[in-house]
Amino acid sequence: MKKSLLALSIAILLLLTACTGTPAASAPPAAPAQPSAPADSEPSAPASGLAEVQEITIALSQELNSIDPAVAVDSNSSSAQNNIYEGLYRLDAQARPIPAGAKELPVISEDGLTYTIKLNENTQWSNGAKLTADDYIYAWTRAISADNAAENQQFFTYIANADEIISGEKDIQELGVRKIDDYTLEIVLRVPATYFTSLLVSTPFFPLNGEYVEAQGTAFGSDSDHAIYNGPFVLTEFAGPGIGADWTYVKNDTYWDKDNVILEKINIKVVKETATALNLFTVGEVDQIGIAGEYAQNEINNPAFVSANASTLAFLGYNHTSDLFKNKNAREAISLLIDRSAVATSLLGDGSAVATGITPNNVQANPTTGEDFAQTLGDYLFTDVARAKELWAQARTELGITEVKLDIISFDSDRMKTVGAYLQGLLEENLEGVSVNLNITPVSVFMENAKKQDFSLYLVTWGPDFSDATSLLELFESTSGNNWGVYSNPEFDAALHTANGEFATDAVKRFDQLQEAERIILEDVGVSPIFFQSSALLRNVKLKDIIYHTTYPIYDYKSAYLAD
Amino acid sequence: MKNFSKYLLKKIGIMLLTLWLIVTCTFFLIHSLPGSPYVNQEKLTPAQLEILNRQAGLDRPITEQYFIYFKNLLHGDLGTSFQFKNQPVAKLLINRVGPSVQLGLQAIVVGTVLGVIFGIISAMKQNTWADSIVTIIAILGRSIPNFIFAVVLQYIFAVRLGLLPIALWNGFSYTILPTITLAMAPMANSARFIRTEMVEVLNSDYIELARSKGLNRWQTAFRHGLRNSLIPLITLLGPMAVSLMTGSLVVENIYAVPGIGEQFVKSIITNDYPTIMAITILYSVMLVLVIFVVDLLYGLVDPRIRVTGGA
């Protein structure tokens, strides 16, 4: 309600100033000149606390890898592209898909396999071209034909024949997508997936104007002048992937919902050093920076401190191929030793939260009550050192071992080093006969070791790819390619299969079944969640309504504004 | 003249051979690193990796990959970055090397000029308070790592005094602090070298002779002392200039400079093979060229080193 009021007043403000306003010098050629708001022409109607100049500057720690939705894979590109392109749906603040490029939510067939989607007829490209069903089909087939399509396979895999096309067994023409008319799209799935609508917010599903992209050839996406946009903002002053250390989003005047976009300009600066970013923030040169580690600890009481919804799971995985960890008592002993609250609040103290299970908060909501998946799961993770020692003694007797050497592997990051060292001390101190070798290496080396099961325990973080508990739970399926600990529990597999098979079209039963699956693996101590990693930020207290998502795209500036 | 062209040809031949060796060694070394070059490699399944490797030609035997790479290289094709999608490495390099080279050149000029001045003062005013101050500056400049300078300078001149920008890359004023930071090492090195060499030269017999012929102290110092000290200085400065111009990870990060230094480190961490290769080649070409130029400069500074037959 507040937002629409704001939008209305902004629209009035713009309308009033459009006649007298002077075009800003930096307005890009792609977008019509932006009127600025001179102080004397402010409407008498209450400006509802909006700052006069709706321009912000944000420091990011990484360059923009790509502005081509087909090939982007990282979170930074995903957030950037979400500002300048728009797919069929966006996520609202509760992570529910809401229509954007589509007119309404999809009409799903009884068997859950066919999605019919009516498109929003008001959408258009920043060069004025119409946006139709062809643009979606063009973009998707282009993405699935891309050389690196397998990097985005987790998004496409649900569409009929997509896997076969990516592996080269089938022709792109056989992709399960077709146009019914200019404004109606039909998607056929391989298997029913109730969360498919949530997946459609991801960058690879963004539309592209085929005529424009083909005309550009390899130059498409090489800089901000070689792309056209359909999102709330258009991109300007971007010199190209890996080159541009700053770029700007300017409000898109051809955007169908421009009346609800308040910010006129967002400047992005790449600043890799947190200390530098902090200096820039302190003197007011930037409105938002990312912080971590000790910086986050130091700033946690700063009113500008924002701990964005902790959504990345950090867990300890067991090597289930080893005799030691085939023993449940051994696994449970380790899990019971971990003081999760101490890890999250004292050890890290950067806004990270105690893990309550595998699925983090705000990933999935109960379809009937709207309650959160994680918060209604129940308690399965405890700390009980005495019991842990007892179980360890039992395990040692059962396995007939006295001395054990454990290898914990993890990847090079401040948090992993801290938690890894904590675990090393914890296990050596409390478990008789245990010596721990902590092996922290660059990601690529860690991956090699993890994939070969060359470890006793692995410590890793994993963020959900889409807003559904399946995204993390499927990691521990016995057939999963990323199940590095080779956890194999037929009961767990069956529960997950039932949820996404038999109950695929029954949201209520499916939700319960997914919770059931998570309870099974937690009770079995198949894996030990430790904490939910936060993304801590310092943000200008006047900068409001940036939506944070637990999945890509993480930051959404469409509704953001600067308060007075 | 004939001797000189023979000398040049031989030099260039050796340079090319050196470059080929570097390219070849680097190629095989980086391909023996564990991991894959894909951005979200931690989430890829073995099946997906296989498809990606096939598409990228990384499933072929390593020697075959080497010959393909080398052939493309001879055609001037450095490949496409894995990290930055669809971005030709050549374009990436050309655009990012600018700020690094600019900072490197500024730093080497500022550093050397100041260093030479300090060195001369120090040598001429041996064992006075001026000498002591210069020595202290030189020792500090050499022993304090440049990230400390960077942070301290940034705090004092940008955050506290507000005289200069904190960071980012937006015009000449943005280059001042990083230049001073990077100039510390060449300044300290040149001051120390000049002082040592000049003190030695100034105490030698031929200086005594020059002095006795009526030349004054400063004239002899410049004509003989400085010239002789430049030889070791140039030898030292050449490679240092290359290392400065190819960027410093720490200084570029602290001042948010979009240079090449950070790219190099990041490309190694992420296994971005084409980028690692291209930056290595760039670095080696610059180094080899500078060494060549230094060789030629010797002759200019000291005619006695000029090429003669059989040299």
Image (tube, grey):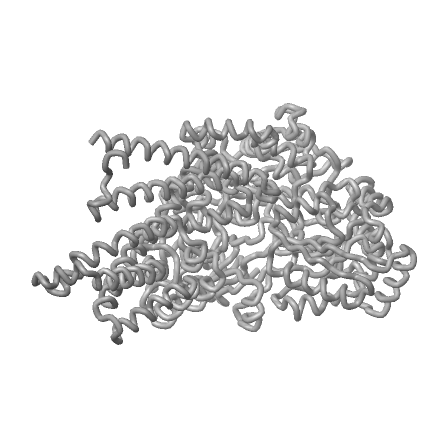
Image quarter in which the N terminus of chain A is found: bottom right
Relative depth, front residue between A210 and A239? A239
Residue A340 is drawn in which quadrant? bottom right
Identify the residue at the far front of this view.
B205
Relative depth, front residue between B18 and A304? B18
A484 to the left or right of B244:
right
- In the displayed structure, A295 sits above or below A150; it is below
Residue at 21%, 48% in the rendered image: B302
Residue at 32%, 52% in the rendered image: B237
Identify the residue at the far bottom of this view.
B129
- In the displayed structure, B173 sits above or below A502; it is below
A208 to the left or right of A265:
right
Relative depth, front residue between A35 and A16? A35
Residue B309 picture location, percent across and down: 24, 34
Identify the residue at the far left of this view.
B214
Q: Is residue A221 visible?
A: no
Residue B163 picture location, percent across and down: 31, 68
Residue A223 picture location, percent across and down: 42, 41
- In the displayed structure, A308 sits above or below A195; it is below
Residue B165 is drawn in which quadrant? bottom left
- In the displayed structure, A369 sits above or below B77; it is below
Residue at 67%, 50% in the rendered image: A464
Residue A22 picture location, percent across and down: 31, 54
Residue B48 is drawn in which quadrant? top right
Q: Is residue B183 visible?
A: yes
Image quarter in which the C terminus of chain A is found: bottom left
Q: How many marks?
A: 0
